[in-house]
Image: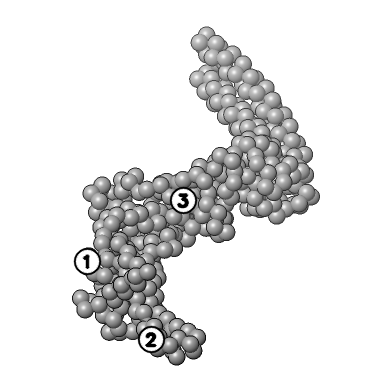
Amino acid sequence: MKRKNVVVWTMVFGTMAGGLISCGGDAPMPEQTSYETVTIEKKDITVPIKFSAKLKGQTDVTITPQVSGQLMNICVKEGDQVKKGQTLFMIDSRSARLELESAQANLQAAIAQENSAKLEYESNKNLFEKKIVSQYTLTSAENSYKQAQASTAQARASVNSAKVNLGYCTITAPVTGVIGEIPVRTGDQVSPGTELTIVSGNTNMDAEFSVTESIIERAVSEGYSMDVKEALKHFPDVTFVMKNGTEYPIKGRVTSATGVVNATTGTISLKATFPNPEGKLFSGIQGTVVMPFDEKGVIVIPQEAVIKLQDKQQVFKVQADSTATSVEVTTQDIYNGVDYAVTSGLNVGDRIITVGANNVREGQKVLFPEAPKAEK
């Protein structure tokens, strides 16, 4: 945009010594100068659109016990970084060990019974072939053998179940991540459903946020695809900004969308995934996802040119006779702290007042020819 050096009315009153007047000197005339203006033109810009977001680990897992018992040991602290398979909690395992020993004893008894039934069956089979015993005797021995086999299988399953229950007494991390709040203490009685902690798998973090339907339609209108998931591939890289204004240094990508517009809010929920190699991001952090969009052929004007009157905005346009006329405009913030994008009210070639626009009155003349320079 072209700027012209012009300034507001200034009145310079020379208050010369009384000797000038007595000598017949003329008092200086007020000097009229012009306002600073710009001529409207279009240009291509990048507009960062901001969305409120909340972080969540991609694999946040709530840790609960699978068996009841007394909590004997807490092996981690809140905020600890843990690896998959690392021991987190230990529950009293004495009852589970006794159950396992009992199940193993029952298995041994069942195996012995099966072996005896097998010998009985094989003996009766040989006798039947020699026509010494009846078919009934053979069939009864065979059934007893099969029943013993089933009892052995059942006892073996009980052993495996007891081993699993014993394993449940040692609770390990299902994913690599960071330990959340631990609401229990050593000695507490816990049972299935008792929340012990949350392991936030923070290798990658998802920022959950909502966008208007028009944002998705915009990506689709670019000709990429009518499929939402395909359109997401063409979304630009996004940035996460903390509440304190700190910008996370690694860019993220929009990786998923619900695909269903919320009937109440008219928005679609999205997730942007951010790599978190140093573990600086945590679940629950709130901030802003910034998504840059390229805009072509946009009218951009300085913010200082816009006068806000309650719910309306206006600028002063310079007419051909150098007078100012107020024009209502609609604008969009482009988040650079300096300019607005104008969506209606101005055309290419219009000339508007920038510096001092708040001091202009309707119909006021705002452009004046430059005063000739005095000869030395």
Q: State the SS at label 3.
A: strand
> Mark 1 or 2 closer to N-term?
2
Image x and y of residue 248, in percent: 53, 49
What's the distance in space between the residues labelled 3 and 2, CA to CA? 66 Å
Q: Is residue 143 left or right of residue 355?
A: right
Disc number for residue 125: none
**Split into 4 quadrants, where in the image is the C terminus?**
bottom left
Residue to which mark 1 is pinned:
349
Badge 1 amino acid: Gly
Residue to which mark 3 is pinned:
239
Closer to the camera, 281 or 128?
281
Q: Nearer the viewer, mark 1 or mark 2?
A: 2
Q: Is residue 351 above or below residue 108?
A: below
Q: State the SS at label 2.
A: loop
Total marks shown come to 3
> Mark 3 or 2 closer to N-term?
2
Q: Are marks 3 and 2 in contact (CB under 8 Å)?
A: no
Q: Are marks 1 and 3 in contact (CB under 8 Å)?
A: no
Task: Determine the residue positioned at 50% across, 10% down.
Answer: 129
What's the distance in space between the residues labelled 1 and 2, CA to CA? 43 Å
| Colour theme | one colour
Closer to the camera, 110 or 92?
92
Q: Residue furthest bottom?
A: 22
- Residue density around tag 3, few if under 14, some if 14–19, many if 20 or more, within 10 Å: many
Q: Residue furthest left?
A: 320
Q: Quadrant of residue 325?
A: bottom left
Badge 3 amino acid: Thr
What's the distance in space between the residues labelled 1 and 3, CA to CA? 36 Å
Disc number for residue 26: 2
